[in-house]
Image (cartoon, rainbow, N blue to C red):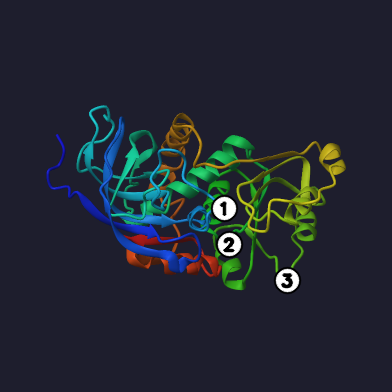
């Protein structure tokens, strides 16, 4: 039976027109209808991510059938569910991954991409997890298989993705983690999480990593920068190294000498998350619940939230992210 207290309309962020952060405004939308296997969530918090900015600027449209409202990760309370949703009950507190719709008072989520909020976490902390941890786990663990004793280089080490990747990698025995960042404050955070910090504005990360690894280089590289970093990643990669791109902030086109790729037997790969089939996202959710959620509850991995904005100030959150000032996650409190 539906919860009769659910309103027909809600407040959500609207993109007035493709363009700047100033085009985001709070507007009235219809509360979404649940489909097969879905839950209706009263959203308490939502994460702000780079793909949201890409969507706002017209470069990352939502998948067919997904909500046009921004927002890929939420935390809140189950207030209604479809007859085929049997994993959660009304009143349960969950967080999870959505293909859109997070910047709103209510959102639907498939039960297979929802997860219970880790014990001890607030809604804001819980909502900071899904997009980043789904991404890091799928790419660093599933796709390129970081192993005990290997080294990992993370570009953008102080970002939401970066701080999650450092903490996951540090759970592996004797793993050495390097992370690039753009200021001393960001490098301080990176060091506090157990990584070797490299200020890429002042230091040559290729030379430093070669020196730190006795000339071997990095076994795994997680890159969200692209551009000229693509060829430099090939330079710094170790024999049988794996390079995975998840974004291209400096551009997706680069000139690369593929002879070192052949000689080092490198693997170059990349992925996006939003358009993946439900079954693949569900498998990642299951792995996180099994392997990462217990570490969060034990305090071995922790959410790192830089700043919290009110929903009506989503545009300011986008501006703050575009200015590159954040360390960790930016959140919306609904």
Within 10 Å of the Cα at label 1, are there few (<14), some (14-19), or many (20+) other Cα atoms? many
Q: Residue furthest left?
A: 4
- The answer to the question of whether label 2 and label 1 lie on touching residues, with beta carbons closer than 8 A, is yes
Label whose residue precedes the other's in the sequence (3 or 1): 1
Q: Which mark is residue 190?
A: 2
In terms of secondary structure, where does tag 1 sit?
Answer: helix
- Of the numbered discs 2 and 1, the one sitting upstream in the chain is 1
Of circles 3 and 1, the one toward us is: 3
Quarter of the figure that contains the C terminus: bottom left
Name the residue at 63% across, 40% down.
Answer: 146
In x, y percent, where is residue 103?
A: 36, 55
Q: Label for residue 202?
A: 3
Q: Nearer the viewer, residue 5 or 78?
A: 5
Residue 188 as seen in the image, left or right of residue 205: left
Badge nearest the viewer, 2 or 3:
3
x%, y% of residue 184? 61, 72
The residue under label 1 is 166
Estimate the spatial distance between the alpha carbons at disc 3 and disc 1, rounded to whole Å. Answer: 21 Å
Cβ–Cβ below 8 Å for labels 3 and 1? no
Q: Residues within 10 Å of mark 3 (few under 14, many from 20)?
A: few
Q: Which residue is drawn at the image coordinates 73% and 71% (left, top)?
A: 202
Indicate which disc residue 176 carries. Answer: none
Q: How many marks?
A: 3
- State left or right for residue 170 relative to residue 21: right
Of the image marks 2 and 3, the number of the one nearer the N terminus:
2
User: Which residue is more in the foreground, 311 or 214?
Assistant: 311
User: Foreground: 271 or 132?
Assistant: 271
Q: Quadrant of residue 269?
A: top right
The residue depicted at 52 percent of the width and 56 percent of the height is: 50
């Amino acid at each position: 039976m539906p919860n009769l207290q659910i309103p027909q309309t809600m407040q959500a962020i609207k993109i007035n027109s493709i363009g700047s952060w100033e085009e985001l405004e709070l507007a009235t939308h219809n509360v979404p209808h649940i489909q097969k296997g879905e839950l209706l969530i009263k959203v308490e918090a939502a994460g702000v991510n780079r793909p949201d900015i890409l969507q706002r600027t017209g470069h990352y449209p939502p998948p067919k059938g997904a909500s046009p409202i921004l927002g890929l990760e939420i935390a809140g309370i189950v207030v209604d569910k479809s007859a085929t949703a049997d994993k959660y009950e009304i009143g349960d507190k969950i967080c999870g991954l959505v293909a859109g719709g997070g910047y709103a008072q209510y959102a639907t989520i498939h039960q297979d991409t929802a997860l219970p909020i880790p014990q001890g976490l607030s809604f804001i902390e819980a909502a900071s997890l899904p997009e980043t941890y789904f991404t890091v786990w799928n790419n660093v663990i599933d796709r390129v298989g970081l192993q005990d004793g290997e080294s990992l280089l993370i570009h953008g080490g102080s970002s939401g993705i970066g701080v999650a990747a450092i903490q996951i990698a540090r759970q592996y025995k004797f793993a050495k983690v390097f992370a690039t960042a753009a200021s001393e404050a960001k490098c301080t955070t990176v060091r506090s999480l157990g990584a070797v910090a490299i200020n890429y504005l002042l230091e040559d990360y290729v030379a430093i990593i070669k020196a730190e690894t006795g000339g071997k280089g990095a076994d795994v590289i997680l890159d969200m920068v692209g551009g000229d970093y693509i060829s430099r990643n090939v330079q710094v990669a170790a024999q049988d190294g794996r390079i995975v791109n998840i974004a291209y902030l400096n551009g997706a086109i680069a000139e690369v000498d593929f002879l070192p790729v052949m000689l080092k037997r490198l693997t170059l790969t990349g992925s996006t998350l939003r358009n993946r089939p439900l079954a693949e996202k569900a498998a990642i959710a299951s792995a996180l619940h099994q392997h990462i959620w217990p570490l969060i509850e034990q305090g071995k991995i922790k959410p790192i939230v830089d700043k919290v904005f009110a929903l009506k100030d989503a545009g300011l959150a986008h501006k703050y992210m575009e200015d590159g000032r954040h360390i960790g996650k930016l959140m919306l409190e609904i």
